[in-house]
Amino acid sequence: MYFAVDLGATSGRTIVGKLEDGKLVMRELTRFSNNLIEVNGHFYWDIYALYNEVVRGLKEAVAQGLTISSIGIDTWGVDFVCVAADGSVSQPLSYRDPHTFESMELYMRDVMPRSELYGISGTEIINFNSIFQLYAMKLAGNSAFAGAKKFLFTPDALSYMLTGEMVCEYTIASTSGLLDAHKRAFSPRLLESLGLNADQFGRIVFPGEV
């Protein structure tokens, strides 16, 4: 039996599925809201509430006597948490937060032109891409950014909270605008432009890795 977490920008659900006669049969276990938190003009996701909902879904699976062989977590892209040196997880800013409204233009004016950025990442240039969110945090002197030992994208953060393992799954990382599309790895050039390095994002893993 497989356990899936499907998180969207307004709601989420947990699902179990299995193969029967060559077909995937799925059943919803739980459904819940995903609410933005507005504090001092900024919008955050409640990563701890989402984690609790994942655990609640797992407990429901156990209550129903199901044996789970693997867990998959799917979320929207670009957003991430900052993990401090002691392993604590910050509440992540949302891609809907206004702090990125000017950061894209400032980055392309002061750091790297659009053509060079696109040539490396191959990612559509949108103001809420992770690279521009990180740049906005750097410009603002954001304390979570300054103190981060690791940056984990949303599904990777939930995986870390479940397992203690910090890895970076490739397909979610591909939404960030930080990868070298030719090498399928983090671009040193793009990370250096933010004062960061690849070690702060963890080892890249590909779908299906245990």
Image (tube, rainbow, N blue to C red):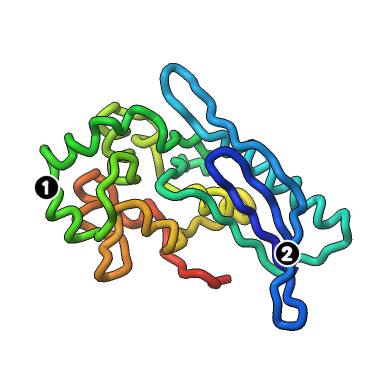
Name the spot of residue 179 as percent of width and height, x first: 30, 59
- Residue indicated by mark 1: 113
Alpha carbon distance from label 2 to label 1: 46 Å
Name the spot of residue 91 as percent of width and height, x first: 51, 34
Q: Amino acid at mark 1?
A: Pro
Mark 2 vs mark 1, foreground winner is 2
In the image, what residue occupies the spot 32% across and 65% down?
Answer: 185
Q: Is residue 179 left or right of residue 160?
A: left
In the image, what residue occupies the spot 37% across and 59% down?
Answer: 174
Q: Residues within 10 Å of mark 2 (few under 14, many from 20)?
A: some
Name the spot of residue 42 as percent of width and height, x first: 42, 24
In the image, what residue occupies the spot 33% across and 29% down?
Answer: 99
Q: Amino acid at mark 2?
A: Met
- Could you tell me which quadrant the C terminus lies in? bottom right
Q: Residue 70 sits in which quadrant?
A: bottom right
Q: Is residue 66 above or below residue 150?
A: below
Which element is circle 2 on? strand
Which element is circle 1 on? loop
Name the spot of residue 191 as percent of width and height, x first: 25, 51
Q: Is residue 126 left or right of residue 95?
A: left
- Could you tell me which quadrant the N terminus lies in? bottom right
- Residue indicated by mark 2: 26
Q: Is residue 181 left or right of residue 40?
A: left
Q: Residues within 10 Å of mark 1 (few under 14, many from 20)?
A: few
Which label sits on residue 209?
none
Q: Is residue 168 above or below residue 154?
A: below
Residue furthest to the top in view is 40
